C-alpha cells in the first residue's frame, strides 16, 4: 500500500488509554497541538482499574474534570463505601474474618472539611472501572481543538534524530502512514512497542503467579450479599472479587494453580471463588462479559526518555506493578499531567530541553517507592495465605470451638494490623522532587517522610498542600493557574506586589499567574512562606518570605525552575541510587520466588510475629 507522510507535529502520542488521553487533554489545555493514535477502534472492555485515587482526583480537579467524572451514570455513587471484607465464603455459611472499613466519598468530604490542616487531599478517591473512565475521556478528547485522534492505527517503529522522530503506522486500511513529529510519547501499555523501538529496557519482570479474570453480571449475587455491600471481597484461598458498580456487575480474580494448562470454564471459576474454603457456591450468572488469564508484573523502565529526549514514556509503558495499592493507572495520571506541562514549556520556548530528562529523574524514583510498597502489600497476602493453610481445619469448621476462636482471633488481628492498601497517603500525596536539578532549594531540612500519612510542607519539591480558604469552600487549588502560579500572602490591611518577578517573567515569556491572598492567615501558616511559586503539577518550585531583591536573582530562580540551568550546588542524590539498588534486589527475588511463600526469599520479613 502507498505511504502517506504527515509532517510538522509538535507531539504524537501512541496509545489512547487513560494516560494518553489525559496527556492529550493537558497539552490542549496548555495550547499545544497533538495527534493521538490508537490501534483499537473502541475503548477497553476490560475492567483494568477500579480506583481513581485522591491524587488522581486532585489532578482531575485541576484539569476541570473531577465533577463531570464523578457524575458519570455508571460510576459508583458518592454514598458507596470502599470496604474490603475477608471471609471464609461469600455464601450464607461463610464467616467474616475481618473488614477494612474505608468511608464513602460523602463521608470523606466531611472529614476533609473538618480537618483543614493541610494533611488532606483536595478530593476523595472515586470507585470507577476503566471501562467507564476510557469511554468518558474519549468523548472529551473528541471535542478538543488541539487534539487530532486516529483510531485503527497500529504503531510499528520509529527513527529518532536530534530534532525529531519519524514514526511508522499501519492504518485500518492496511496503508502505511509515516509521521514526523518533534516529540513521540509512548502511552501504549506494558508491552510498549515504542519503548522497545527506543531500546529502553524494563527492570524487573512478571511475578510467577497467574490469575483468571471473569467479568460478569449477576442479579442473584447482588441480592445475596450476606455481609452487605463491599468494594473488594477476599474469600479464603480463592482470590478476590470486586463490586464494580454497586448494582450487579462484578469481577472475579482467581489464582490459578501452577501447571494448569487446560481451558477454564469462567462460570466454574466464579463458583469456586465465591465459595472460598467451604466449596463452590453456585449462583445464577446472567452474563459473562469478558474473561481471560493474566499475570501481574513488577517492573520499571530504566529511564522514561531517550538520550536525545525526543521519545518519552508514560503510564504502563514506563512502569508495571501489581494491583495491590492501586498505584498503576494512578501513577500514570500523574505522569500525564507532569509530562504535559514540560512538553508545553519546551515547545513554547521558555523551558529548557533538560526539563524532559528531569521528568524521568523526578517521576521514576516515586514509582520505585510505590512498587516497593506494592511489594509489601503482596507479601502480606502471601503471609495471610500461609496462615490460612496453618489454620485450615479451623476455617472450615473441622476443629474445636476453642481452636476456631484462637485461629479467627489471630487472623483477624493480622488482617487488621495489615490495614487497608489504598490509604497510603505518603505514597499518593507526599511526592517529593527535591532531588531535581530544577527545584530551587531553600536549605531547610526535609520533614520526615511516612508511608501512611502526608505531612504538609511547601519545602521546594513538595506537593503544595490543599487548604480551604476562610470562606470554607474554596480550595487554594482552585486558584492555581493552568501554567505557573505565584501565590502571595499579605495581611488584611497590607498592600503587596511582586513587580520584579512579574517583569522578569513577562520578559522571558514565562507564563505566570499572580494570586494575592489577603488575610488568609490559616492558609499562610500551613504554606509556611509569604511567597510560593507553584508549578503546573501543583509542586512547589521556589518559596521565600520576600520578593527577590534584584532582577538578577528573580531571573536566576526562573531559569532554574524552567530547566535552563541547574539549581545552585546541585548534585545527584546518593539516597536515590541506594533506593534503586534495593529495588533491583527486591525485583530479582520477587519475580522468581513468590510461589515459595517464604518471606525471606521474597525479600522482606513478615510485618508481624505470629504465635
Image (spheres, rainbow, N blue to C red):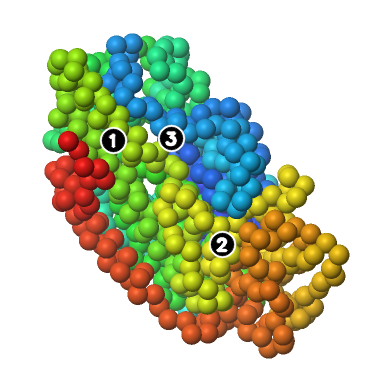
Question: Does residue 9 appear to the left or right of 590 in the view shown?
Answer: right
Alpha carbons under labels 1 and 3: distance apart: 29 Å
Where residue 392 sits, quadrant-wise, is: top left
Vertical order, 111 against 224 (above or below): below
Of callouts 1 and 2, the N-terminal one: 1
Alpha carbons under labels 2 and 3: distance apart: 36 Å
Q: Quadrant of the N terminus?
A: bottom left
Residue at image position (61%, 28%) is: 73
Give coordinates of residue 569: x percent, y percent. 48, 85
* Local SS, label 1: helix
Give coordinates of residue 174: x percent, y percent. 44, 50
Where residue 583 sits, quadrant-wise, is: bottom left
Res. 267 in view: no
Where residue 572 sits, quadrant-wise, is: bottom left
Q: Nearer the viewer, residue 1 or 218?
A: 218
Residue ID for mark 2? 457
Which marked residue is nearer to the observer: mark 1 or mark 3? 1
Give coordinates of residue 381: x percent, y percent. 27, 38
Residue ID for mark 3? 47
Res. 126 in view: yes
* Local SS, label 3: loop
Of callouts 1 and 3, the N-terminal one: 3
Vertical order, 366 against 8 (above or below): above
Residue at image position (45%, 12%) is: 223
* Mark 2 surroundings within 10 Å by alpha-carbon count, few (fewer than 14), some (14 through 19), many (20 or more): many
* Mark 3 surroundings within 10 Å by alpha-carbon count, few (fewer than 14), some (14 through 19), many (20 or more): some
* Local SS, label 2: loop
Q: Nearer the viewer, residue 104 or 414?
A: 414
Alpha carbons under labels 1 and 2: distance apart: 33 Å
Q: Of the numbered discs in the image, which one, if any, rests on residue 414?
A: 1
Which marked residue is nearer to the observer: mark 2 or mark 3? 2
Amino acid at each position: 500500500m502507498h505511504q502517506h507522510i504527515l509532517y510538522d507535529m509538535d507531539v504524537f502520542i501512541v496509545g489512547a488509554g487513560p494516560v494518553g488521553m489525559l496527556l492529550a487533554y493537558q497539552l490542549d489545555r496548555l495550547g499545544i497541538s497533538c495527534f493521538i493514535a490508537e490501534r483499537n477502534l473502541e475503548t477497553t472492555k476490560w475492567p483494568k482499574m477500579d480506583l481513581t485515587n485522591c491524587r488522581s482526583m486532585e489532578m482531575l480537579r485541576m484539569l476541570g474534570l473531577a465533577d463531570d467524572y464523578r457524575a458519570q451514570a455508571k460510576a459508583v455513587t458518592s454514598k458507596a463505601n470502599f470496604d474490603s471484607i475477608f471471609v471464609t465464603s461469600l455464601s450464607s455459611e461463610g464467616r467474616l474474618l475481618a473488614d477494612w472499613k474505608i468511608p464513602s466519598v460523602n463521608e470523606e468530604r466531611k472529614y476533609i472539611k473538618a480537618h483543614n490542616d493541610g494533611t488532606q487531599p483536595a478530593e476523595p478517591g472515586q470507585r470507577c472501572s476503566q471501562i467507564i473512565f476510557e469511554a468518558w475521556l474519549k468523548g472529551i478528547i473528541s471535542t478538543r481543538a488541539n487534539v487530532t485522534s486516529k483510531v485503527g492505527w497500529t504503531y510499528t517503529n520509529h527513527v529518532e534524530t536530534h530534532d525529531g522522530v519519524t514514526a511508522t503506522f499501519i492504518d485500518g486500511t492496511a496503508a502505511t502512514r509515516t509521521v514526523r513529529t518533534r516529540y513521540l510519547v509512548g502511552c501504549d501499555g506494558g508491552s510498549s512497542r515504542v519503548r522497545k523501538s527506543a531500546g529502553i529496557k524494563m527492570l524487573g519482570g512478571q511475578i510467577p503467579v497467574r490469575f483468571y479474570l471473569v467479568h460478569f453480571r449477576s442479579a442473584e449475587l447482588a441480592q445475596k450479599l450476606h455481609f452487605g455491600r463491599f468494594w473488594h471481597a477476599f474469600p479464603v484461598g480463592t482470590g478476590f472479587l470486586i463490586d464494580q458498580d454497586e448494582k450487579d456487575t462484578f469481577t472475579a480474580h482467581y489464582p490459578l494453580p501452577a501447571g494448569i494448562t487446560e481451558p477454564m470454564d469462567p462460570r466454574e471459576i466464579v463458583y469456586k471463588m465465591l465459595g472460598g474454603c467451604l466449596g463452590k457456591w453456585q449462583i445464577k450468572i446472567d452474563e459473562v462479559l469478558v474473561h481471560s488469564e493474566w499475570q501481574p508484573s513488577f517492573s520499571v523502565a530504566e529511564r522514561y526518555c531517550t538520550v536525545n529526549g525526543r521519545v518519552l514514556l508514560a503510564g504502563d509503558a514506563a512502569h508495571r506493578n501489581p494491583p495491590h495499592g492501586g498505584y498503576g493507572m494512578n501513577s500514570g495520571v500523574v505522569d500525564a499531567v507532569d509530562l504535559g506541562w514540560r512538553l508545553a514549556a519546551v515547545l513554547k520556548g521558555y523551558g529548557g530541553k533538560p526539563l524532559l530528562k528531569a521528568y524521568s529523574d523526578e517521576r521514576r524514583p516515586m514509582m520505585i517507592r510505590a512498587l516497593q510498597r506494592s511489594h509489601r502489600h503482596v507479601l502480606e497476602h502471601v503471609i495471610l495465605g500461609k496462615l490460612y493453610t496453618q489454620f485450615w481445619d479451623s476455617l472450615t469448621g473441622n476443629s474445636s470451638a476453642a481452636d476456631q476462636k484462637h485461629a479467627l482471633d489471630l487472623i483477624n488481628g493480622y488482617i487488621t494490623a495489615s490495614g487497608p492498601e489504598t490509604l497510603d497517603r505518603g505514597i499518593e500525596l507526599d511526592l517529593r522532587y527535591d532531588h531535581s536539578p530544577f527545584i530551587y532549594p531553600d536549605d531547610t531540612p526535609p520533614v520526615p517522610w511516612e508511608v501512611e500519612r502526608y505531612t504538609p510542607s511547601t519545602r521546594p519539591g513538595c506537593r503544595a498542600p490543599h487548604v480551604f480558604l476562610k470562606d470554607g469552600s474554596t480550595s487554594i487549588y482552585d486558584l492555581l493557574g493552568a501554567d505557573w502560579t505565584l501565590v502571595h500572602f499579605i495581611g488584611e490591611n497590607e498592600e503587596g506586589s511582586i513587580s520584579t518577578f512579574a517583569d522578569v517573567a513577562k520578559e522571558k515569556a514565562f507564563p505566570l499567574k499572580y494570586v494575592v491572598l489577603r488575610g488568609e492567615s490559616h492558609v499562610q501558616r500551613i504554606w509556611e512562606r509569604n511567597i510560593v511559586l507553584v508549578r503546573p503539577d501543583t509542586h512547589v518550585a521556589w518559596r521565600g518570605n520576600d520578593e527577590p531583591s534584584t532582577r538578577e536573582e528573580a531571573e536566576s530562580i526562573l531559569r532554574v525552575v524552567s530547566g535552563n540551568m541547574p539549581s545552585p550546588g546541585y548534585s545527584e542524590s546518593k539516597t536515590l541510587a541506594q533506593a534503586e539498588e534495593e529495588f533491583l534486589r527486591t525485583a530479582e527475588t520477587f519475580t522468581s520466588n513468590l510461589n515459595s511463600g517464604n518471606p525471606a526469599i521474597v525479600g522482606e520479613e513478615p510485618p508481624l510475629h505470629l504465635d
